[in-house]
Amino acid sequence: MKKTIWIILAVVLQGPAAEQRPTESEEEPLKPVGDKFMKEITSGKTAEALDGLLDNYWYDRSGLAKFKMETKGRTEAELTKVEASLGKGQPDGYEFLGVKRLGKRVVGFVYLQKFENFVEPWALTYYESSGTFRLAGLQFGQAAQDVVRYFSVAEPARLQVPATDERPNGRNEARLKEAADKFLTNVSNGRMAEALDALLDRYWYDQSGLTRSKVLIESQFNAELAKAEITVGKRLPNAHEFLGAKRLGKCVIRLVYLQHFENFCSGWALTFYKARHEFKLISLNFGDSVEDDLKTFTTTEPTP
């Protein structure tokens, strides 16, 4: 799924070193401001969202009127492009990931905006000068990806299954793990068609194009597995290994596996996304496209 990438503005402001971090009372209003902005953006009130944020917090007051007009046009256009790629935006569909700091005066609030088939990040960055926070950067999409990666959480060799207040999706995630295990079992035993039928019929995000997707995916992965067997030997029946789960917020989970062959192994990654009520499979990756995931779960044991 192609993603639209854009930046409204990101600035680096310089100021004298502060002797102490701004107090919590000074930062306290910023989180509700971000929440209000995201609620309005995800409710289709783009102009209202930008007016409220920029009128009160934008750092450059002299060019505010012109900047707001230009920003509204770009924002509406880019959100339209994203919806064409990722599906409709979800009403009130956003998730607060957390806060990122740089030194004592820079604080960023990071969110995910939910669309039908995946998310795009927002980052609101404030800079404190003379006791007042001003919005110094507003980023969306790829421009915010470097920030979002700090909030990606890896859970090696385990999956938190029980449902709790902190992890309400636990039971649903257990079913995802069971479906992924079954998929890898079928694949390792040479049953690709059966593997895809069981997984995609239940979880594929685009059910309207399911038949075509299954044909294309089966052809692709059969070819990739044939290449792998030339390089690392025959696949070993029932020989797969769950490495762990990678999470982004509460709505994205990526299950990472090794499939074992005679002479080495190769990686699989299954990414599930929950826009509102249930998880859907949005991507299925094998081989080179899983290299970064394998690095995440690689451990070292330095010599004592």
Image (cartoon, helix red, strand yellow):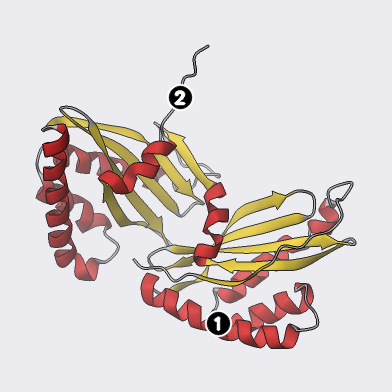
Q: Is residue 266 above or below residue 209?
A: above
Q: Is residue 73 above or below residue 242?
A: below
Q: Position of residue 31 (x, y in %)?
A: 71, 61
Q: Are marks 2 and 1 in contact (CB under 8 Å)?
A: no
Q: Which residue is at the front of the view, 221 or 41?
A: 221
Q: Which residue is at the front of the view, 257 or 142?
A: 142
Q: Quadrant of residue 258?
A: top left
Q: Position of residue 161 (x, y in %)?
A: 41, 38
Residue beneath disc 1: 74
How far apart, in angstroms, are the residues tagged by discs 2 and 1?
46 Å
Q: Position of residue 250 (x, y in %)?
A: 49, 51
- Tell me the residue at 75%/56% (across/down): 106
Q: Which residue is at the front of the view, 261 or 197?
A: 261
- Tell me the residue at 44%/71% (across/down): 4
User: Looking at the picture, which amino acid does disc 1 mark?
Assistant: Arg
Q: Is residue 204 visible?
A: yes
Q: Quadrant of the N terminus?
A: bottom left
User: Looking at the picture, which amino acid does disc 2 mark?
Assistant: Thr
Question: 10 Å neighbourhood of mark 1: few (<14), some, or many (≥20)?
Answer: some
Q: Is residue 160 visible?
A: no
Q: Secondary structure at mark 2?
A: loop
Q: Secondary structure at mark 1?
A: helix
The disc label shown at residue 300, or none: 2
Is 22 placed left or right of 163 in the picture?
right
Total marks placed: 2
- Tell me the residue at 46%/47% (across/down): 247
